[in-house]
Image (cartoon, coloured by chain):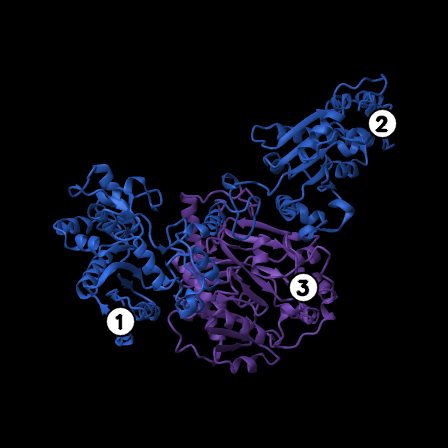
Chain colours: A purple, B blue
Amino acid sequence: MGAEPHAYPILDLPAPQRGAVQVWRSFRLRLRRRVLIARALRKRRELTPITDRTAGLRRRAILCVMVVRNEAERLPHFLEYHRRLGVDHFLIVDNASTDDTAALLRDCADVSLWQTAASYRRSRFGLDWTNWLLLRHGHGRWCLTLDADELLVYPHCETRPLPALTRWLDDHGIDSFGAMMLDLYPEGPLSAHSFQPGDDPLAILRWFDSGNYQVQVQPRMRNLWIQGGVRARTFFAQDPRRAPTLNKIPLVRWHWRYAYVNSTHSALPPRLNATFDETGGEQISGVLLHTKFLPSAARRAAEEKTRREHFADPARYADYWDSLATDPVLHGPASQRYQGWRQLEGLGLMSRGGWI
Amino acid sequence: MRLGFVMLTHTALDRAAQVARYWASNGCPVVIHVDRRTPAAEHDALRAGLADLANVRFSPRHVCEWGTWGLVAATQAASSMMLAEFPEVQRVYLASGSCLPLRPVGELQSYLDQHPRTDFIESVTAADVDWTIGGLNSERFTLRFPFSWRKHRVLFDGYVRLQRRLGIRRRLPEGLVPHLGSQWWCLTRQTLSAILDGPGRAAYDRFFRKVWIPDESYFQSLVRIHSTNIESRSLTLSKFDFQGKPHIFYDDHLQLLRRSDCFVARKIWPQADKLYETFLSPEAASQPRAEPNPGRIDRLFSKAVERRLTGRAGLYMQSRFPTRERENGRTAAPYSLFQGFAELFEDFETWLSKSAGTRVHGNLFAPDRVQFAGGVGIYNGCLSDSTALRDYNPRAFLASLIWNTRGERQCFQFGPDDAQKITEFIAGDPNAQVSVITGAFAIPLFRSNLNFGIIRTEAARLQRIESEFLSVLRAPTSKARVRIWNLAEFLENPIEPLQTIVDEINPRSPHRLSEVPRLVDLTGFGQFLQNLRNQGMKPVLMGDFPVNGPSPTSGRRARSKQ
C-alpha cells in the first residue's frame, strides 16, 4: 500500500476499502470519538447556566447550538431568520462577550444561555462546549450547529420550513446534511456601509464568488475538504493550502455518541461525513451564507489578531488578519449578486438532490 | 350514484379529520381506520372531532406495519363496514390520511358516472412489473417473509436467499394470477363485495397473509378474478422516487397539483396549510377541468431522478464528488487545447477567436500567471490568475473554468514550459480537443537570441517534457480527440489542419477560412536545428527539416496555398 495522500483531488477518490487496515482505522476513529466525548464531559464544568429553558422541549424539537462572542450586532437578525426557518430552541454559549450579547439573549424566550470565560482555543474553538450541549440536549433531535455569522439556506427554504426538510431526511434515512460556507461581501471597501443591530446583513453583503472552489476528500474520515472562494482568492493566493475550510455539516440528527471533530467540518462516526454522492449523482445539500464581512470586520480582525484565539497556529495567520484590517475591496467584475437558493443550485454550489 | 371513502390513517389525524369532514359534508359516507399503534388520545380526539357527522364511521383497528397483512385486514374491515352500513354506496374509494382531494367530490362523482361499472385499480401482471424496489416481483408471492424488512433486514435478506437456494416455493391458490399495483383504488360495490364475500376468501386470505407487501397485490390480484371491467390506473396521484419512497407535496406544488387534473393526491405534507386551504375551499371548482393527466407533471419527477442519480456532468461540489469510474462526464462542455500554434503563427489567439467565434485564452497553465483571455486577473466565477491557486488543484481549476463558462467554448494554449500536472486529466477527457504541433517549442528559442548553451539545455528540457505529454496523449486510456503533427509535417500544408480544427469547434460556420494566420519567419530554422545537433542534442520532435533547403515556409507560402 502506497503512502496515502493528505487529500484526494477530483477523480482520485478510491472506493471505500475493506480489510484489516479499515478495521484498524475504524478502531482508531472510535477511540478518537470517545476521547472527544470525554473532553466534552470534562469541559461542561466551564459552562455556567444563565437561563436554562430546555425543560419543556418537545421530543422532535429542532435545536440550534452555537458559541458566540460579541455578536450583539448580528444576533437579532440571526435569531429571527432561523426562528422563521423553524428552529424551536437556541442553545447558546456566551464566551466572554463584552457587548450586549448576554442581555439580548437572556430575554429571548426560545434561548437557553450558558456563559464561560474559559479559553475558546483550549476548548478546541468552542467545540467541546458544543459537543457537550449536543450530547446533553441533542440526542434524537435534529440539531443545527452554527456560528452567529452563518445563515442557513437549503433547497425550497423560502416555502418549506426546517421540519419539512428534516422529515424528508428522516424518511430517506439520511442523518447529516451538508452545507458549504459561502462568503458574502459588499461592493466597495468593507467599512463603506453602515449596519445597525437587527439589520439584514444580506442588504449590504450581496456578492459572492460563484465558481472558484476546490473540492477534495480527506482519507481518514472520508470527509470533504473544500477551499476557495473570496478569502482564498484575496488573502491566500500565495499559500492556498492554508485557505479556510468551507465545507460544513451543520444539521445532524444527533445521537449522544456523536462528536464534531474539527469545527463542524467533520464529525464522527465517519458515516456522518458522507454528505456527498460518489457515484455521479447529486445528494441534497445547502449553503451557509457567511456574513463575516460586515463593516465591523476590519476592526474585529485587529482585535482577533491580538487575542490569538482562532486557528491552531495563530502566528501563521497574522498576515491574514493584517490584510483584513486594511479594509480591502473584495468585490470585482466577476462577482455574482446573491438571488436565492435556486441561483446557487443553478451555479452548482448546492443541490436539491432528490427532494422536489 | 353514491361514492363512499375508506380512509386508512395513522398520523396527522387532524388533517385526516379535515379531509374526512370535507367528504362527509359533501354527502359521501366515510369509514376511517386508525392504526392500532396510534396513541389512544389522538384516536379519541379524532372521534370526538367528527362526532357531529352522521355519515362517518370508525372501523375495528388493526396494527398496520408497512408491508404486512395488517393493512389489507384494515382495508377489508373498513370496506365491509362501508358496504354494510351504507347500502346506498355504489363505489368505494380507498384513500389514506395524507390524501387530499384536488377536485370537488361532484366532479369525481360525475367522472365515475361516465364510467359506469368500471373498477379503477392499477393492476399489472407481477411478471411485467419493473418498478419494484429490491428486485422482488413474483417472488413476493412464492417465498415466505416472516421477518420484518424494516427492523430485521439481515434476517429478511438471509431468509430470502436461503429459500432461493433450497428452491422452496409456495403454491398459488388455483386461478390466482399475481398482479401488483398502487394501493389506492376505487372499486364498484359489485366487485368489492365479490372480493369480500366471495367463496374463496378464506383461502386467498390465508395465502396473502404471507405474501410480502400484500396491500399492493391483494385487491390488485383478486380484482382480476371478480371484475369484468378494469381500468388499470389509480385515480390517486402518487409519485415515487428512485428508492420507491413516495414524494411528498408541499405548498409550492400548488400549481403542479392543479395542472395534473387528478382527483386525489398523496402524500401531502401535514403542514401544507396553503394546499389544504385551497383545495378544500368551496371555490375549488372554479375552472372547467379536463381528464386526469398525471403525465403532464412527469417531467419534473424524471428530472429529479436524473439529477439524483446521474447529476450534472462536469460538476464537482459539496454533494457530488464522483470517483473515476462514475464521473458521467469529466468536464461540463467541449474545449480545445492548442500546443505549438501560438509559437508558429503570429497572433494566433486573435485569429482563432475570430475564425471560430470562441473564447481563446493564452497559456492557462503558464508558469508565471494564468493567461486568461483579455489578460484579466479575475475570470468567470472569480477564478484567479494566481498560479499558486491554480497549481494547488489544477483539476479543480480546469473543471471550474469549463463549468463556469458553459455555453461558450473555451480554447487555450499549452506548452512544455507550462505546469504539466493537468495533462493526464485532459488526455482522459472526451470533451478535450487536443491539437499539438510537436517541436514548435523550438521556434521561440530560435528567435530568442540567447546564449546557445542556454538554448540547447532549454530545448532538451522542453523536448523531454513534450515527449512525456505526447506519451500521455497516446496512452490507451486517452479519450480526448487528439491530433498530433510534427512541425515539418504541419508546415507542408498548414491550412487543412486549421480548417478541420475550426470546423470541429464551430460546425455551424459553413465557409472556408477566409483568413489564415501569418506564419512566423522560419528562415534559417533548419540550420538552427543542425546547430543543436552539432552541440550534442537530438531534436526529434520537429520532424525532417531540411538543413539548408529553402525554409519550407513563409507567410507568403501559407497564403499561396489557399
Depth check, front residue: B474 or B498: B498
Discs 2 and 1 share one subunit: yes
Which residue is the site of mark 2? B555
Query: Residue shown at 40%/60% (left/top)?
Result: A170
* C-alpha gap between disc 2 and disc 3: 51 Å
- Secondary structure beneath dot 2 equals helix
Q: Amino acid at mark 3?
A: Tyr
- Neighbour class for label 2 at 10 Å: few (<14), some, many (≥20)? some
Foreground label between 2 and 3:
2
Residue A75 falls left or right of residue B219: right
- Secondary structure beneath dot 3 equals loop
The numbered mark at residue A185 is 3
Depth check, front residue: B153 or B512: B512
Residue A37 placement (x, y as % from top left): 44, 64
Chain containing the residue with disc 2: B
The numbered mark at residue B3 is none
Query: Residue shown at 49%/70% (left/top)?
Result: A65
Query: Residue shown at 85%/33% (left/top)?
Result: B448
Chain containing the residue with disc 1: B
- Name the residue at the left extreme: B199
Residue A96 placement (x, y as % from top left): 58, 77
Chain containing the residue with disc 3: A
Residue B6 placement (x, y as % from top left): 26, 62
- Secondary structure beneath dot 1 equals helix
Q: In the figure, B337 relative to B369: above or below?
A: above
Q: Amino acid at mark 2?
A: Gly
Q: Does residue A186 appear in this view? A: yes
The numbered mark at residue B43 is 1
Residue B515 falls left or right of residue B314: right
- Neighbour class for label 1 at 10 Å: few (<14), some, many (≥20)? many
* C-alpha gap between disc 1 and disc 3: 53 Å
